[in-house]
Image (spheres, rainbow, N blue to C red):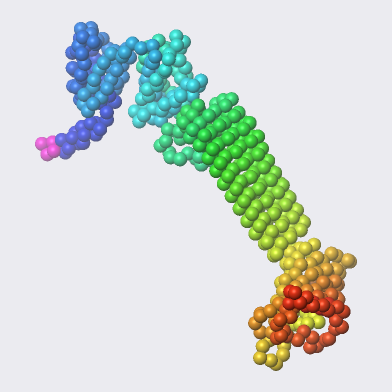
Amino acid sequence: MRYLPALFIVLSIFHASAQHVPVLERSVTLTAQNERLDSFLKRLSHEAGCVFSYSASSLDVNRDVNNQFNNQTTREILEIVFEGQVKMKQKGVYIILTPLPKSSKEVTISGYVVDEASGEKVESATVYNPVTLRSVTTDQYGYFEYSVKKPTPDDYKLIIKKLDYTNTVVVAPQKRSSFQKVSISIDKDKLNNVGESISKPAVKVWTWTKNSIASINLGNVQDTIHRTWQMSFVPFVGTNRKLSGSVTNDWSFNIIGGYSAGTNKAEFGGVFNINTGNVKSFQAAGMFNLNGGETKGVQLAGTLNLNPQATQGVQASGFANLALQNMHGAQLAGFLNLTAKHTEGAQVSGFANFSKTINGTQVAGFANVAQHVNGSQIGFINLADSIRGVPVGFLSFVAKGYHTLELGADDVMPVNVSFRTGVRAFYNIISVGMRPEQADSVTWSFGYGVGTSPRIVKKMYLNIEATANQVNKGNVEALNLVNRIYTGLDLQVARKFGIYAGPTVSIRVYDTTFNRHPELFTYYTPSVQYERTYPRHDLAMQIWWGFRAGIRFF
């Protein structure tokens, strides 16, 4: 007796959980031999825990039932007893039974999809027609219901697909509604080849939710279907229906946006285009294009082009182009171009270009960044690890390029410190200088320049440079610019040490309205070769020969 309370609790829990299962999906075991239909329905209602509501005259309750049902659902039992010609509608515990209307406009193909080995119902299997591409998915009890509009005398073909299962074809008559129990088996080849499922990252990238019907279909229908053209309003609302993610098209027209397995000739999207597979020839969208496979041809977007796989052709967008593999062709963007691997061609953007390696040209309004460059970089800032070519910009830094620290003197400043960076073919110069003197304010200068340093012989180079230095006494108060053209020799006497010297042509431009300019020449007074004033602009100019000399650390 002491075990009765525990047994009662267990039975109560089991009964409560059973009530959560819909009446039509509750499993029942019954045997009927020459039993009137009304009597059989009464027993079935007792076993299933439901109440049947029907018209005795419309269902012919006087006929006999002769069947044995072993652990079958209420729905399946009713389908067998009525031979698929009854309509079932559940309201609470009530099941309303009415004869199917005799209509030539629509028939219903329904049934269960079960695992052949275990007999378990298969949830989220895709059931579709290969011609119309209309599809449904099985519910959590493995049940599906497929409506056929305007049936014909021919048999109707349905394909059932489920991830890791073999494809199964069902042929059903269109003359009347029918019920089928379809068994599908595990595809051992796919099950063993685990890498096949994880080698398609685009499937996970382009699915919005794991539970969406479109996502389920995309996982089940992994082999592609081909169509000459398609038109859609938004993804999965179009001629390819909910199977659009498994269909490749020659021509694709998307009013707002489209979602497909690939495009062979051209695709147009009012807002966006999304393809899980390859895209060829031409693609244009008002906002963005996202392609999971390879892209070949012209890709145009108002905002963004994103290609996780290889790209060949032209990417052009108002904001950014992102190629996550190799890019062969040209990227044109209003703001940013990025290639995660190799670029063969050109990157042109309003702000920045990034590529791991590039054989070609980068042109940016602000910055170009690449690990290895075989070609040129043109931008305000250029960064590279190595380059075979020329970086042209305000500041270029090449890790394996040319960069020196210089200590020297010229005809104006006895102490100058300069930094050169870039490559010998073209480098940037940043410099500061000062004049040691006993005064309230220090005379100093800062400047910028560019230069080139071709080799003459081993360890000796020719320097050709153009610089501009603002000379001040104390604060910067007025224009006092000393511009120089320098041609000299650079002798590398040791591995990281060199000396340089050479003449300069100095051109001074200064503000004539300011009378506190520092005295230029204190240690050396050159002969001014040319002098002129420009009263209209309050400027004056002086030209003289000068010199520069010093040491460099590489």
Taking the view exactly as shown, the residue that stands out farthest to the front is 536
What range of the chain is rendered magenta?
Answer: 1-5
x and y percent of residue 244 in the render? 51, 30
- Which quadrant of the figure has residue 436? bottom right
Q: Position of residue 203 (x, y in %)?
A: 51, 38
Left or right? Give the position of 493 relative to 95.
right
The answer to which image quadrant residue 433 occupies is bottom right
When the figure is inspected, residue 479 is found, relative to residue 223, above or below; the finding is below
User: What residue lies at 72% left-to-right and 71% top-to-bottom?
Assistant: 448
Image coords of residue 245 (percent x, y): 51, 32
Q: Residue furthest bottom?
A: 438
Q: Residue at x 69, y 65 (%)?
A: 395
Question: Quadrant where the C terminus lies?
Answer: bottom right
Magenta segment includes 248 = no
Q: Note whether residue 426 is visible.
A: yes
Q: Where 343 sits versus 450, above or below?
A: above
Q: Name the residue nearer the viewer: 168 or 298.
A: 298
Label the magenta part by its dominant secondary structure.
loop
**At 24% from the left edge and 14% from the top edge, which residue is drawn?**
31
Task: State the residue lying farthest toward the right.
Answer: 457
The N terminus lies in which quarter of the figure? top left
- 87, 190: nearer the viewer: 87
The answer to whether residue 195 of the structure is visible from this angle is no
Q: Is residue 217 left or right of residue 140?
A: right
Q: Count of labels shown? A: 0
Compared across the picture, whether 50 is left or right of 542 comes to: left
Residue 333 higher or lower than 444, as above or below: above
* Image position of 391 with respect to 435: above or below: above
Q: Residue at x 51, y 37 (%)?
A: 257
Where is residue 535? Give x, y as percent: 76, 77
Residue 96 found in image quarter: top left
